[in-house]
Image: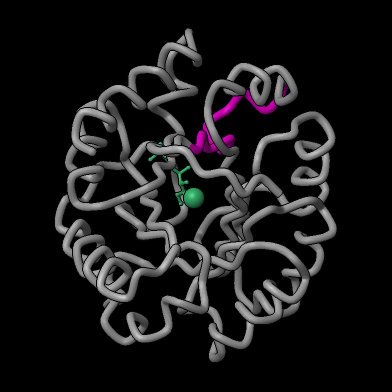
Amino acid sequence: MSLAVSHPIISPSILAADFTNLGAEVRAVETADWIHVDVMDGHFVPNLSFGADITAAVNRITDQHLDVHLMIENPEKWVDNYVAAGADCVIFHVEATDDPVGLARHLRAKGVWSGFSLRPGTPIEPYLPHVAEFDLVLVMSVEPGFGGQKFMPEMLEKVRLLRAEIDSKNLSTLIEIDGGISASTIGAAAEAGCDAFVAGSAIFGQSDRAAAVAQLRESAAKQI
Ligand code: DX5
Ligand code: ZN
């Protein structure tokens, strides 16, 4: 697990990569900080992506921190498969479990980071008292399920509330944002207090992936 944290953290989502060339795609973004792995089960979200075998394959070809976003039902049943596949951080949705804190403790006991995410319609307030149990909070700035959607700026209010909570208690929990992040939206997310930024189409939709990563990093850094 990579524990050294630089800012801003750029986490390319391989959901937008060319799946016929996944190894080369992962290597093309090695100038980024993490690799974001979007797992969709066709139930929690109306789309299917890939699972633990692809996660393990990605882990075999890179030393990057694997940021695994589980958009699945019954995460309790599946998280161990993702730990075994090499996830460094396992992020599950609070809407999919009755016991987010129990699941976070389970993950930390396995030696990986724990993260929770929430759909745009789910308020952050009930979860603020539990943030210390998590290494990361992933704020969705689109409805989960698909890449290439429009950024929802009103989600930055959740980021501000989280930032205030984390700073007031001096916690090390990271705030990550996911959905519609581009060179034109990343600055506002950085200003609101995000540490880490997922980007799919803004990176893999450009012919020069490394230049896209550099541009995002520069646009975020201006605001920090
Ligand atoms: C959406 C996924 C995102 C998605 C982001 O459900 O969680 O990680 O890949 O894609 P862009 O950056 O294209 O909005
Ligand atoms: Zn994601």
Q: Is residue 24 magenta?
A: no
Image spot of residue 74 (x, y percent): 65, 79
How was the colour assigned to the protein in this rendering?
one colour
- Work out whether 210 lies above or below 196: above
Image spot of residue 6 (x, y percent): 47, 38
**Residue 32 as seen in the image, left or right of residue 137:** right
Image spot of residue 84 (x, y percent): 84, 59
Report the front residue among 84 and 130. 130
Q: Quadrant of the C terminus?
A: top left
Residue furthest to the front in view is: 170
- Using the rendered view, name the quadrant where residue 201 is placed: top left
Q: How many marks?
A: 0
Q: Is residue 13 magenta?
A: yes
- Using the rendered view, name the quadrant where residue 114 is placed: bottom right
- Work out whether 168 lies above or below 9: below
Report the front residue among 46 and 186. 186
- Work out whether 8 lies above or below 25: below
Question: Residue at 44% of width from left, 63% of height from top?
Answer: 172
Question: Residue at 36% of width from left, 60% of height from top?
Answer: 139
Residue furthest to the bottom in view is: 98
Report the front residue among 133 and 119. 133
Residue segment shown in magenta: 11-20
**Residue 168 as seen in the image, left or right of residue 5:** left
**Residue 85 as seen in the image, left or right of residue 40:** right
Question: Residue at 71% of width from left, 19% of height from top?
Answer: 21
Image spot of residue 102 (x, y percent): 62, 87
- Using the rendered view, name the quadrant where residue 27 is placed: top right
